[in-house]
Image (tube, rainbow, N blue to C red):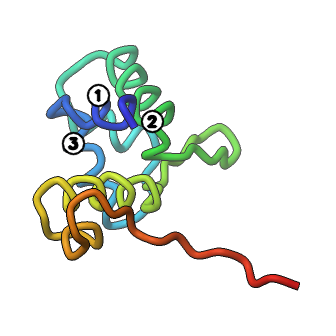
């Protein structure tokens, strides 16, 4: 999770995440939205990919990036628990939330 929060700490990466909320985008379209070099944008995309926040898909010579909502949900659940609004907030101090278990056979 440290990698995830480190990736979200940069404003350019947060803008990329916001752009991807409306759907997958080609790396060139993402780069065109910023006034910075291609290697810098690639570095930001790699940081987001390493954190599990985006996934690349090759379409011919184009790479499209898609937002991975499960990583965003994990970060939100963590922050909600810290803020006292998540599942763990309703439990007595020190009691951990139950996790779903497979039924016994």
Q: Are marks 2 and 3 in contact (CB under 8 Å)?
A: no
Identify which residue is drawn at 35% across, 26% down: 44
Label of residue 51 in the image: 2
Label of residue 20 in the image: none
Comparing 28 with 9, the one in front is 9
Identify which residue is drawn at 42% across, 23% down: 42
The spot of residue 90 in percent (x, y) is 21, 76
Q: Which residue is mark 1?
A: 6
Q: Cα distance, mark 3 to mark 1?
A: 11 Å
The quadrant of the rendering that contains the C terminus is bottom right
Identify which residue is drawn at 47% across, 72% down: 98
Q: Cα distance, mark 1 to mark 2?
A: 8 Å
Element at badge 1?
A: helix
Q: Are marks 1 and 2 in contact (CB under 8 Å)?
A: yes
Q: Which mark's residue is nearer the viewer, 3 or 1? A: 1
The spot of residue 16 in percent (x, y) is 28, 44
Comparing 99 with 55, the one in front is 99
Q: Cα distance, mark 2 to mark 3?
A: 13 Å
Element at badge 2?
A: loop
- Seen in the picture, residue 82 relative to 5 is either above or below; the reply is below
Q: Which residue is mark 3?
A: 14
Q: Residues within 10 Å of mark 2 (few under 14, many from 20)?
A: many
Q: Residues within 10 Å of mark 1 (few under 14, many from 20)?
A: few
55 to the left or right of 21: right
The spot of residue 97 in percent (x, y) is 39, 68
Residue furthest to the left: 83
Identify which residue is drawn at 36% across, 30% down: 2
Element at badge 3?
A: helix
Q: Quadrant of residue 4?
A: top left
N-term-proximal mark, 2 vs 3: 3
Q: Residues within 10 Å of mark 3 (few under 14, many from 20)?
A: some
31 to the left or right of 53: left
């Amino acid at each position: 999770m440290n990698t995830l929060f480190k990736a979200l700490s940069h404003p350019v990466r947060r803008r990329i995440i916001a752009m991807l909320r409306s759907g997958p985008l080609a790396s060139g379209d993402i780069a065109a939205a910023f006034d910075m070099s291609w290697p810098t944008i690639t570095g930001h995309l790699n940081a987001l990919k390493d954190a599990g926040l985006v996934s690349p898909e090759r379409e011919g010579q184009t790479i499209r990036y898609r937002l991975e909502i499960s990583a965003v949900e994990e970060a939100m659940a963590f922050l909600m628990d810290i803020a006292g609004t998540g599942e763990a907030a309703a439990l007595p101090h020190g009691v951990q939330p139950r996790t779903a278990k497979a039924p016994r056979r």
